[in-house]
Amino acid sequence: MSNAMQFGIFSVGDITTDPTTGHTPTENDRIKAILTIAQKVEEVGLDVFATGEHHNPPFYPSSPTTLLGYIAAKTERITLSTATTLITTNDPVKIAEDYATLQHLADGRVDITLGRGNTGPVYPWFGEDIRQGIPLAVEKYALLRRLWREDYVDWEGQFRTPLQGFQSTPRPLDGVAPFVWHGSIRSPEIAEQAAFYGDGFFSNHIFWPGSHTAKMVAFYRQRFEHHGHGTADQAIVGLGGQVFMRKNSQDAVSEFRPYFDNAPVYGHGPSLEEFTSQTPLTVGSPQEVIDRTLGFRDYVGDYQRQLWLMDHAGLPLKTVLEQLDILGEDVVPVLRKEFAKNRPALVPDAPTHESLVLAAQAALVQSSTEEAK
Amino acid sequence: MTTRTLAVVSAGLSQPSSTRMLADKIAAAAVARLEEQGFEVAVESFDLRDVAQDITNNLLTGFASAKLEKVIVAVTGADGLIAVSPIFTASYSGLFKSFFDVIDNRSLTDMPVVIGATAGTPRHSLALDFALRPLFTYLHAVVVPSGVFAATGDWGETGDTVRSLPARIDRAAGELVALMKDSQRPSRVHDLFVLDASFSPTGAYTAS
């Protein structure tokens, strides 16, 4: 099924003490909880579940395709994705193999978001240098693309041992590589890379002001057009977001405040009120979340994917599942309807495996017609 | 008439603050000299105290509040900078350092800077040259040779009577103005969205 816009959640995968109870889940608790959360995403009618990738505590998801492979077997409809896959420190050959395998297991319900990672020591742990973050992302993705698109690859680069006559297996499902999003908070080079290939651009969006996201997305859109993939408003944009909801706005604020105040990322800094006004974080009623989310379109244009951060900062599983219920029942159905209004016909729907297969077939027909002429 | 903008950053904490007083005096001397030479001068003065909370928040969240962003834009886009800190525990104050920690480390490249400091006694004066000067050198700013240090006594009769505070201020201001006259800085403010000419989205790998 194709949606103009996809809605879902992305998980950082932190193991954090619940500040209201002092309870810290075990790794096993958290890993089992995330499986429940992913299935709930499908149950409440959302479209995407994405997991982060980390190689240090307090995070558990070091092996995303293992996790997503299990979820693939337990779900039927949702797209499985990442947020993000570390293109800098992973071997692109292993990414090509792992995600093509996942694509087969999930019958195509897979895409991938590439990011550089900002945890300094991860680079040397995997034999890399963080100062080479951008060149690593650029070179390794260039190889990844070829591994998925060419049956036999001869390759030589700066950051990996050369390949002669290498074939990455399994070949992508139906000969179509998973759709790729490039994620970056602040590097225009990555927006340029996404635009150059006509890939998607995902803006994390949750830790920085919307004005900054607006500039990054505008740059990506303009470069997408420059590189000849369509008009700027046809570029494929995804956004992060962060919400906490209760029927009454004030209940949401008082329940979420201790989690906010102690959150690993921004805790003990700005107040909840300051952070809410300065970033897309919305804590309040479902209607407030709807209004705020619809407002994103005002500064990034019509876009394809909205993911929310839901399970973090020590929130108990029960609360996260309640939040997903609210998203599925009260928020997303309204957003689907409202975002569809005034959406120009030329704005593409969110890419799926099916849409990519159709596009590949159309391109094939066109090139054979041209040959016949 | 050609305009030059001068940013003044003071990390003084009390109000009124002798650190701010020193910063203002250096600014006034620089403005007088620039005006003498036919420039119009726009001065933008900031007390870091006013954005102290915002600076801490920026350290924790990675982004500047709108209020702090205004200060950063004004400071990094100026033709010249006067930066004055009180000396706390043998160095610049933590607030002063934190401000220069949160701005982009490329954004003061080539900036003409006068450094100044205040403290209770002249025995702290070397902090200018072992603390403030290397900080700006790291940021590739151009720090003029004369730093201005004002001990409490400099504000009265126990100051240096041979090279008086006003004379030291004037000398530093002269050095700053000599650099600001030819400043091209505002046209060279680093634009995040202008990619390095050598950047290639496909990298430098050898295709087959």
Image (cartoon, coloured by chain):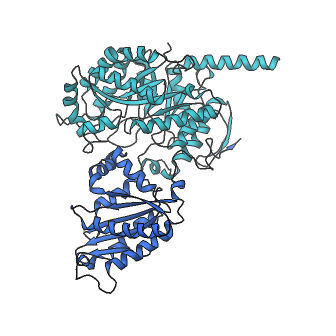
Return the x and y of residue B121 as percentages of the image width and height.
23, 77
Residue lying farthest to the bottom in this orientation: B162
Q: Colour of chain B?
A: blue
Residue A183 showing in the rendered view: no
What residue lies at 52% left-to-right and 29% top-to-bottom?
A99
- Which is nearer the eye, A312 or A59? A312
- Which is nearer the eye, A261 or A136? A261
Residue A217 showing in the rendered view: yes
Q: Colour of chain A?
A: cyan
Q: How many marks?
A: 0
- Which is nearer the eye, A214 or A304? A214
The answer to whether residue A287 is above or below residue A133 is above
Return the x and y of residue A175 as percentages of the image width and height.
63, 22
What residue lies at 44% left-to-right and 74% top-to-bottom?
B174
The answer to whether residue A269 is above or below residue A83 is below
What residue lies at 24% left-to-right and 44% top-to-bottom?
A268
Return the x and y of residue A59 as percentages of the image width and height.
34, 38
Quarter of the image containing the C terminus of chain A?
A: top right
Return the x and y of residue B142 as percentages of the image width and height.
47, 67
Residue lying farthest to the right in this orientation: A373
What residue lies at 62% left-to-right and 49% top-to-bottom?
B197
Q: Give left or right: position of A240 versus A176.
A: left
Using the rendered view, name the quadrant where residue A283 is placed.
Answer: top left
